[in-house]
Amino acid sequence: MSNIKETASSFFEVCEAGRGWAACKEYCVENASFSSHAAPLLEVTTIQDYADWMQGVVGLMPDCGYDLKSITVDEGNKHVSFFAVFSGTHTGEGGPLEPTGLQGTVDYVYALEFSEDKIKHLTKIWNPHYFFQQIGWE
């Protein structure tokens, strides 16, 4: 029996820590896809690009982290979902403005789809505008 929850959890931890594709790729199939309806991520189509994007987020918000609320596993459909609250303070260089020093929090969901024991697709659901308003970007 596969352990997609363990794989998903390991991926979630390294991706959210901003460790980039080098740390994430062992959990994914080659060319694993990504999607999100959030404007900042509309052009991101692979998990590789998303993992590297998250690495940039950690550079902008070195104190960022998450509070994991729940993990849902659907073995039959080979899906694992994470519901968490992201928080971070814009103190790092980069982004649309100089560091604002403002902190924000936002709910988000990762929905991971598996092929065998590896992640084949990640959908991220979040509201960037809500977060950007808190950190002074909008």
Image (cartoon, grey):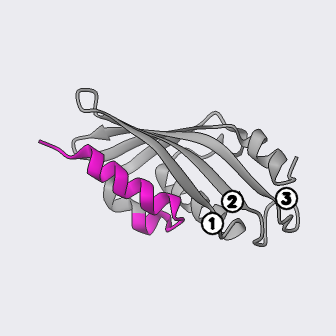
Q: Judging from the image, what secondary structure is the residue with disc 3 in?
A: loop
Characterize the magenta stretch by its predominant secondary structure. Answer: helix
Looking at the picture, which amino acid does disc 2 mark? Gly
Residue 59, placed above or below residue 81: below
Whether the residues at callouts 1 and 3 have beta carbons within 8 Å, the answer is no
Q: Residue at x 29, y 45 (%)?
A: 5
**Mark 1 Cα shell of 10 Å, populated few (<14), some (14-19), many (≥20):** many
Q: Is residue 114 left or right of residue 13?
A: left
Q: Residue at x 63, y 66 (%)?
A: 58
Looking at the picture, which amino acid does disc 1 mark? Val
Residue underneath mark 1: 58
Mark 2 or mark 3, which is nearer the start of the sequence?
A: 2
Q: Nearer the viewer, mark 1 or mark 3?
A: 1
Residue underneath mark 2: 88
Q: Judging from the image, what secondary structure is the residue with disc 2 in?
A: strand
User: On the image, which quarter does residue 42 sit in?
Assistant: top right
Q: Is residue 1 left or right of residue 63?
A: left
Mark 1 → mark 2, Cα distance in angstroms: 9 Å
